[in-house]
Image (spheres, grey):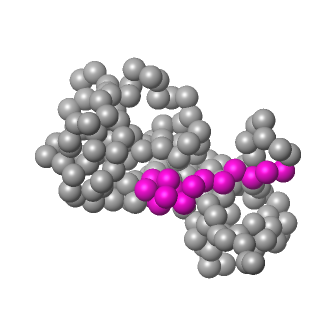
């Protein structure tokens, strides 16, 4: 029986202004890689440049079997598996495929997703439970981001305990549950 591909949470310990980060190397090798990105102004060799950099510097997700991914981890010393504290030793963090696909689709189809690190979203920031009817996020269920004075409606999508994003949703697509 051949092992199935899974979404692994990985760490890339290369610096943010590095020209070749692990997600570049893995993508060039033909692996499916997702890294939440944002545009940032960096000073490189004395000149300011706009670059797309990872939102969380050391976070990337790779869709592959562990057997196929292990040689890359051995080849690139700055690439590591993320492990969950409290679980068996050497058990890499795996994200359910539907959770990861939903997250990728939501942030990829939104112009300005707002990213949050684990612990940044407090219980009071989770608003009403909704279902999205129509549009690119059709059939998503979740909670709206509730911040005083916020004019746009944003749905919170999460990859459990790693990263959250609030994506803009047109009010006509929102159905309160």
Rendered residue at 36%/41% (across/down) = 142
Rendered residue at 54%/36% (across/down) = 117
- Left-right relation of 143 to 149: right
Q: Image quadrant for the C terminus?
A: top left
Q: Quick check: can you spot residue 11? A: no
Picture coordinates of residue 100, whole percent (x, y): 51, 56
Q: Which residues are magenta?
A: 90-104
Q: Please, which residue is most extreme toward the front here? A: 1
Above or below for 118 versus 32: above
User: Which quarter of the picture shows residue 149?
Assistant: top left
Q: Nearer the viewer, residue 89 or 54?
A: 89
Q: Quick check: can you spot residue 168? A: yes
Q: Image quadrant for the N terminus?
A: bottom right
Q: Nearer the viewer, residue 33 or 141?
A: 141
Q: Nearer the viewer, residue 123 or 75?
A: 123
Does residue 93 belong to the magenta stretch? yes
Picture coordinates of residue 77, whole percent (x, y): 82, 60
Picture coordinates of residue 40, whole percent (x, y): 47, 49
Rendered residue at 21%/52% (across/down) = 133
Rendered residue at 28%/21% (across/down) = 148
Above or below for 137 versus 121: below
């Amino acid at each position: 029986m051949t092992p199935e591909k899974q979404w692994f949470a990985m760490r890339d310990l290369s610096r943010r202004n590095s020209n070749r980060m692990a997600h570049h190397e893995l993508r060039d090798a033909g692996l499916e890689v997702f890294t939440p990105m944002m545009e940032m102004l960096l000073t490189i060799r004395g000149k300011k440049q706009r670059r797309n950099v990872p939102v969380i510097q050391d976070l990337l997700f790779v869709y592959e079997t562990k057997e196929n991914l292990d040689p890359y981890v051995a080849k690139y010393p700055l690439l590591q598996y993320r492990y969950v504290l409290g679980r068996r030793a050497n058990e890499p963090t795996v994200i359910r495929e539907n959770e990861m696909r939903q997250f990728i689709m939501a942030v990829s189809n939104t112009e300005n997703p707002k990213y949050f690190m684990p612990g940044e979203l407090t219980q009071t920031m989770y608003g009403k439970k909704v279902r999205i009817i129509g549009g690119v996020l059709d059939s998503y269920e979740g909670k709206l981001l509730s911040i005083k004075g916020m004019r746009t409606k944003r749905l919170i999508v999460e990859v459990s305990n790693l990263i959250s994003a609030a994506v803009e949703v047109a009010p006509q697509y929102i159905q309160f549950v």
